[in-house]
């Protein structure tokens, strides 16, 4: 569920959806307007902080949120220093070659901060994989059987018979361990070449799309997809 006044308190009056002088309906339209401008690519230097503010407000005041909301908040916060060095009118335009010492310094700062973002996303996947491998069901290859057939978190009823037939075979171990392999590989992508990173982007995005299809966690595709772009598709000057 989205933001609700019921999740607000004195400590959250800073949040857009909890401000007493702004109705919840107006706050939602303000958030939509801000995010529309962000998505358009207009003036990243000016939209970075409002982007984080909306994301942080949502994850703080939502009645029911998931990990994707925290990922969105973290990434939008870490994008602020990078965006502040971006003087383009539209972020879809190619960055021109530095023409002055100030622009050159901004470019160096921006590329350096990209490594902070990459390290954050890589650490997220390392933490996810390490946490799973310490659980017996993930280590022995049966975790997806329990997760995907769970009546609350599992596959929708229309897929339950198919899932039961597949997960009741040795295939469940291959599928379970493939999740761990992909997550560990995404961490290792910090030192991978461009071709390997592109292949891992497809695998990683495919994994999250599979989670969306089987468990309905669509918001994860957008948050983690953005993280995968930062980790795997951003240029690394001198390293390609």
Image (cartoon, rainbow, N blue to C red):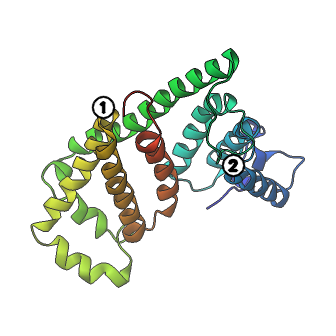
Q: Name the quarter where the N terminus is drawn.
A: bottom right
Q: CA distance from mark 2 to mark 1?
A: 29 Å
Q: Name the quarter where the C terminus is drawn.
A: top left
**Which residue is drawn at the image coordinates 47% and 46% (left, top)?**
229
Pick out the residue farthest to the top: 101
Residue 20 x, y percent position in the rendering: 86, 46
Residue 53 x, y percent position in the rendering: 71, 40
User: Callout 1: helix, strand or loop?
Assistant: helix
Whether 145 is drawn above or below 179: the answer is: below
Pick out the residue farthest to the left: 170
The reply, left or right, for residue 3 in relation to residue 123 is right
Residue 56 x, y percent position in the rendering: 65, 42
Whether 113 is drawn above or below 176: the answer is: above
Pick out the residue farthest to the right: 21
Residue 167 x, y percent position in the rendering: 18, 71
**Which residue is drawn at the image coordinates 56% and 45% (left, top)?**
72
The reply, left or right, for residue 65 in relation to residue 7 is left
The answer to whether mark 2 and mark 1 are in CB contact below 8 A is no
**Which residue is drawn at the image coordinates 30% and 38% (left, top)?**
193
Q: Quick one: label 2 or label 1, which is nearer the N terminus?
A: 2
Q: Nearer the viewer, residue 34 or 8?
A: 34
* Tally of marks: 2
Whether 106 is drawn above or below 230: the answer is: above
* Mark 1 nearby-residue class (10 Å; few <14, some 14–19, many ≥20): few
Q: Which mark is residue 97?
A: none
Q: Quadrant of residue 103?
A: top right
Which residue corresponds to mark 1? 191
The reply, left or right, for residue 163 in relation to residue 28 is left
**Which residue is drawn at the image coordinates 51% and 23% (left, top)?**
112
User: Callout 2: helix, strand or loop?
Assistant: loop
Which residue corresponds to mark 2? 41
């Amino acid at each position: 569920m989205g933001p609700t006044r019921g999740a607000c308190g004195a400590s959250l009056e800073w949040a857009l959806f909890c401000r007493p002088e702004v109705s919840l309906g107006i706050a939602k339209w303000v958030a939509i307007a801000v995010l529309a401008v962000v998505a358009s690519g207009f003036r990243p230097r000016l939209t970075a902080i409002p982007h984080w503010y909306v994301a942080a407000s949502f994850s703080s005041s939502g009645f029911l949120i998931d990990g994707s909301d925290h990922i969105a908040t973290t990434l939008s916060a870490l994008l602020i220093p990078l965006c502040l060095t971006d003087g383009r009118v539209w972020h879809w335009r190619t960055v021109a070659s530095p023409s002055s010492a100030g622009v050159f310094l901004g470019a160096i700062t921006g590329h350096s901060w990209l490594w902070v973002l990459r390290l954050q996303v890589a650490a997220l996947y390392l933490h996810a994989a390490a946490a799973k491998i310490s659980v017996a069901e993930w280590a022995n290859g049966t975790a997806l059987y329990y997760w995907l057939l769970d009546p609350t978190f599992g596959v929708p009823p229309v897929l339950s018979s198919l899932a039961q037939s597949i997960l009741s075979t040795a295939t469940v171990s291959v599928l379970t361990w493939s999740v761990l392999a992909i997550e560990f590989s995404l961490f290792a992508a910090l030192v991978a070449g461009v071709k390997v990173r592109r292949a891992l982007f497809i695998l990683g995005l495919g994994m999250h799309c599979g989670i969306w299809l089987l468990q309905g966690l669509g918001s994860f595709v957008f948050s983690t997809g953005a993280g995968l772009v930062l980790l795997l598709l951003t240029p690394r000057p001198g390293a390609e």
